[in-house]
Amino acid sequence: MRIDPNVCVNLSEEDARDYLLANGDILLNRTNSPDLVGKTGIYRGDGKAVFASYLVRLVLDRERVDPDYVVQILASEGGQRHIKQLATRAVSQANLNPTTFKNHFYIPLPELGEQVRIRQVLLTWDAAIEKTERLIALRVRQKAWLVAKIISGFGHSTKLGDFLKQVSRSVPKPGKPYWALGIRSHGKGTFQRFVEDPSSVDMEELYALNRDNLIVNITFAWEGAIAFVKPEDEPCLVSHRFPTYEVDREKADPHFVKYIVNCKQFFSQLALISPGGAGRNRVLNKRDFLKLEVSLPSLTEQKRLAQILGGIDLLIEKEQSVLVAFKSQKRGLMQKLLTGQWRVKAVETEAR
């Protein structure tokens, strides 16, 4: 938990005594959005600091309980899930009643020495998780920097229409259940949706796809709903709201183009050619889409850059797998340690 020295408040000495924090006090977010209610931290410091009224302070009996041990439990996946179950919800806010929390949130309480040993074990995993998260963030920034460099002029300016061709492979709407393809916003790729009842689709004609086709959701292009078709997406169908484009491979490499169209700078251009109000009222102008210009180096250079960016993606994917494994291991450790199935014994050292 970090304290901002630039944020100050004037309190009387009497009020300050009620709100002053001591080193090791635990703070719990009792009023926030449903996702953030119950967020937990521990105060580290000896200076004068007070807490806001939307927080709950937990003052522990240090002779029986280790604060860091308690924070591990409160901040755990299971702990956060339990807190959210105890909270009451309004339209967009959730509130945790301190009395309800005190009476219904239980924690396993081994002897103090074992509490300390347990949290030391868990903190080792926390350190590994934090290090991996920092490494992933670094890779993401590295990739974004390289893409920004490419866009800013790593080749000649070329209109999309010079290497993209719109294609239309119309097929009758299936009479039986089928898979439809959608596009996530913000460049997060495609997703498949099973249409169990074709009669619920108010169209008689749909469109087939090929791998490495570029597709755009004209309704949500303004927020980055653009993607390339993956091999596993080929059996899926789309509606007329998803114009489809083929890449001229003699001029452009689809793997390189994927990085160009899936970045914030390109999303800004899509927003400019999607006039109208908010949401579904903003529809992409397909003619203007093909007039957009991107920086396009030689085909050989495109393939080389795509390989570099693909290598960064592979590293990110591997590191994310490691991160998932660390978090899974910590959950398993907590289950074993907090239920007493595994014990952390004190290490005895000989006096010399």
Image (cartoon, grey):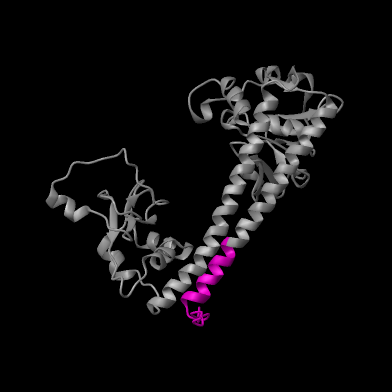
* Residue 339 in sight: yes
Q: Nearer the viewer, residue 308 or 102?
A: 308
> In the image, is residue 45 part of the stretch drawn in magenta?
no
Say left or right for 264 vs 53.
right
Q: Residue furthest right?
A: 250
Residue at the image point whose x is 57% and y is 20% from the top: 272
Q: Nearer the viewer, residue 288 or 315?
A: 315
- Point out residue 13 in the picture as x, y percentages from the top left corner: 13, 49
- Point out residue 130 in the picture as x, y percentages from the top left corner: 54, 54
The quadrant holding residue 109 is: bottom left
Q: Nearer the viewer, residue 164 or 140?
A: 140
Query: Is residue 127 depicted above or below 217 in this figure?
Result: below
The quadrant holding residue 263 is: top right
- Point out residue 56 in the picture as x, y percentages from the top left corner: 28, 57
Query: Is residue 299 depicted above or below 345 in this figure?
Result: above
* Residue 209 in sight: no
Q: Residue furthest front?
A: 352
Say left or right for 255 vs 340.
right
Query: Is residue 169 depicted above or below 273 in this figure?
Result: below
- Point out residue 190 in the picture as x, y percentages from the top left corner: 67, 42
Residue at the image point whose x is 47% and y is 72% from the top: 118
> In the image, is residue 348 part of the stretch drawn in magenta?
yes
Say left or right for 107 vs 186.
left
Residue at the image point whose x is 34% and y is 58% from the top: 87
Specify the segment rendered in magenta: 327-352
Residue at the image point whose x is 81% and y is 33% from the top: 304
Q: Nearer the viewer, residue 73 or 261?
A: 73
Say left or right for 38 vs 171.
left
What is the tally of numbered marks visible in this picture? Answer: 0
